[in-house]
Amino acid sequence: MTRYIIAGLAMALTVALWRLDHVSTSLSTTMQRMRTLESQAQAYEQAITVRDSIDRQYQEAIRDAELSKPQLVADLGTGVKRVYVRAACVPANPQPAGGADAAPAELAADARQDYADLVEANRKVTAQVLGLQQHILTACTPRK
């Protein structure tokens, strides 16, 4: 009878040790998976931070382009800035004299606004393209 009790206890001990080994292995696997997921989450957060900083930088460039437009229109109106256009200047005083008496070439008042619109659009598109290029370089290309 004692032999059966000892055999039963030995078998129970073997099963308990096997189960303990199984739980220990499962714990190790789970801990390793947890570390992997934590590092992936950290990399994802870092990528989001980089993306947000790129977005802020280029949104600021777009906003600056929009804010500089009224100043450009005002500068064109007052003559602080000039637009150089290939044009023939009509003489201010049509007379047969040989002297150069031509009025300076200027944009028409309605063309100044169009020019400012084009400059603003150019700056915005340039900022958008640069932002997208930076996003592609940092977020879309595989890391080596």
Image: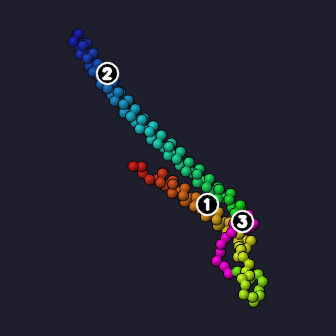
Of all residues, the one furthest to the bottom in this rendering is: 96
Q: Residue at x 50, y 46 (%)?
A: 47
Point out the stretch of residues depicted in magenta: 73-88
The image quadrant of residue 92 is bottom right
- Of residues 96 and 112, the one nearer the viewer is 96
Residue under label 1: 124
Expressed as whole percent of the image width and height from the top left, the position of residue 49 reads 53, 45
In the depicted structure, whether residue 50 falls above or below residue 20: below
Which numbered disc flags the more N-terminal residue, 1 or 2?
2
Residue under label 2: 16
Which numbered disc flags the more N-terminal residue, 2 or 3?
2
**Secondary-structure class at tag 2:** helix
Measure how far apart labels 1 and 2 are at the Cα level. 70 Å
Which numbered disc flags the more N-terminal residue, 1 or 3?
3
Q: Residue at x 33, y 24 (%)?
A: 20
Task: Answer left or right for 133 relative to 60.
Answer: left
Task: Count residues near mark 2 (Cα–Cα under 10 Å), then give few for <14, some for 14-19, many for 20+.
Answer: few
Expressed as whole percent of the image width and height from the top left, the position of residue 115 reads 67, 68
**Secondary-structure class at tag 3:** loop
Q: Residue at x 33, y 28 (%)?
A: 22
Residue under label 3: 80
The image quadrant of residue 21 is top left
- Of residues 85 and 113, the one nearer the viewer is 85
Q: Nearer the viewer, mark 2 or mark 3?
A: 3
Kindly report the secondary structure that dominates the magenta region of the rendered protein: loop
**Secondary-structure class at tag 1:** helix
Q: Nearer the viewer, mark 1 or mark 2?
A: 1
Residue 81 falls inside the magenta stretch: yes
Expressed as whole percent of the image width and height from the top left, the position of residue 33 reads 40, 36
**Residue 6 visible in this rendered orientation of the protein:** yes
